[in-house]
Amino acid sequence: MSAFTPPPTLEPAQAEESHLTKGLVRLTMVCNERCPFCNVPAEDFPAAPTPEEVIDGQIAALLAEGGRTLTISGGEPTLLRRRLLNTIRRARAAGVPLVELQTNAILITPDYAAAMAEAGLTSAFVSLLSHVPEHHDLLAGLDGAFPRCLAGLDALLAAGVRVTLNPVLAAPTQTLLPDYLRFVAERLPGVKSVSVSAVQPHGRARANLHLLPDYALLGPAVREAQGLAAALGIELLNPYCGLPLCVGWADAQDRSVEALEAEIGGARALNIQNEHNKRQGAPCLRCALRTRCGGAWVEYWAERGGSGLEAPLRAAPPWSLEAADPGAQVVSDTLDTLRSDDAPTRWWHTAALAPGDAARLLGSAATDLALRLDPQDRATLIELRRLQRAQAEASPQLRRRVWLWIDTTGHDEAQVLELARLAAALDAHGLTLKGAAPRLRRALALALPSLHLELLP
């Protein structure tokens, strides 16, 4: 059996573009705003526009892959009016049915918006960063940007272009999402879609980490916004550069890019392969949604210590005294009957492993192994070692979690501790010991702090 092959390391901007739900072309990396959180800052790229032949090749590649939406981005693509209009026309003429513009909108006048609509623009993704003028201009890095952005939005809507707004939640705005939605409903009633991003610790934000929101404060605001958006008739979306599911999105997986891609694509979906940018941590260990969420940005764990991250749905092995949350998991004694759309956590429950079972497990839809282990079963121990080696380089969200049940009836304290160390050496995530004396809990916890322990009478 071959070892797990990790995905290539991607820079943050590349990771976002690796989600092949849309094709993306960047006309230029030059921008007329200077957002202090920008993760693709102009200073990191050549100033020359992207060559026409490169753009044509990207459009052709999108169509060859069956893509239906081309996103034109930057930098700020509206700086290059002639090239932008020509790119829209060429994409539509080539057969792209949907062309989207990513823009800050401050250069868009009524005649510019009308020209883009005539060329074939179907939608715009506009960075109205906040409904508070001072916050918007602070986050845009440009005084006076707020009224110009609103004027551009008015022009796009008047031209019949469908608009999605993209607020970027930062420390100053982390509790204000409900108020943002109220503003949109009143001032921009033609907008029915809001894609919620949050400052990520990349690009310029590395030098402005004070802008990084605290998920402990952000989560309640997002949860409140979910209900408000439904009442206002606004679709709230969670993009890849948005938030972990536990930060307000656990009940809205159908509007979260990571969860959607994972459910469609299984355990190796693109969204959870970007582990070089995001990762899961200790709060994610018992999360039933682990396989549908990439976790938090690596730097968020370092800068915020995982604040606000807590499993919204908990999984539990089939023998556990602790009940799993409803809808969180399914359990099967037969590996081949599990399907990726059954539930986010899918247990294979067995009492032994045969040669080849590690490979079968990795090729299946199972996310977790619940094994009633006989420590004397040499064939099972060998197969567990094979599974351990095969997963050695996989990120936590891609690993099959291993939970062991061992009957320790008649074993003394030293023997029980040795069995627990065996479980840890096999990279078990959880261990249930039947018949172990309750007094051993402290000793086991001190010896093996990373192992989730459960003692059964």
Image (cartoon, grey):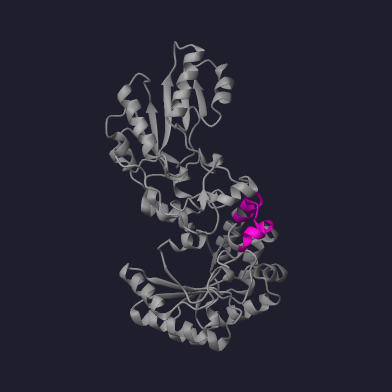
Q: Is residue 416 above or below residue 304?
A: above
- Where residue 371 appears, x then y in whole percent? 38, 28
Residue visible at 52% across and 51% down in the picture: 278
Residue visible at 43% across and 52% down in the picture: 273
- Where residue 213 appears, x then y in whole percent? 65, 55
Asked whether residue 457 appears in the rendered view, the answer is: no
State the residue lying farthest toward the right. Answer: 134
State the residue lying farthest toward the bottom. Answer: 111
Q: Is residue 358 above or below residue 261?
A: above
Q: Nearer the viewer, residue 359 or 29?
A: 29
Q: Quadrant of residue 126?
A: bottom right
Asked whether residue 406 appears in the rendered view, the answer is: yes
Residue visible at 36% across and 35% down in the picture: 387
Q: Quadrant of residue 374?
A: top left
- Where residue 87 appears, x then y in whole percent? 43, 81
Q: Is residue 304 above or below residue 330?
A: below
- In the figure, is residue 359 to the left or right of 195? left
Which quadrant: the N terminus?
A: top left
Q: Nearer the viewer, residue 129 or 327?
A: 129
Give the main secondary structure of the magenta stretch: helix
- In the figure, is residue 225 to the left or right of 372? right
Residue 213 covered by magenta stretch:
yes
Tag count: 0
Q: Quadrant of residue 171?
A: bottom right
* Residue interval drawn in magenta: 204-222
Q: Nearer the viewer, residue 16 or 4?
A: 4
- In the figure, is residue 429 to the left or right of 166? left
Residue 61 covered by magenta stretch:
no
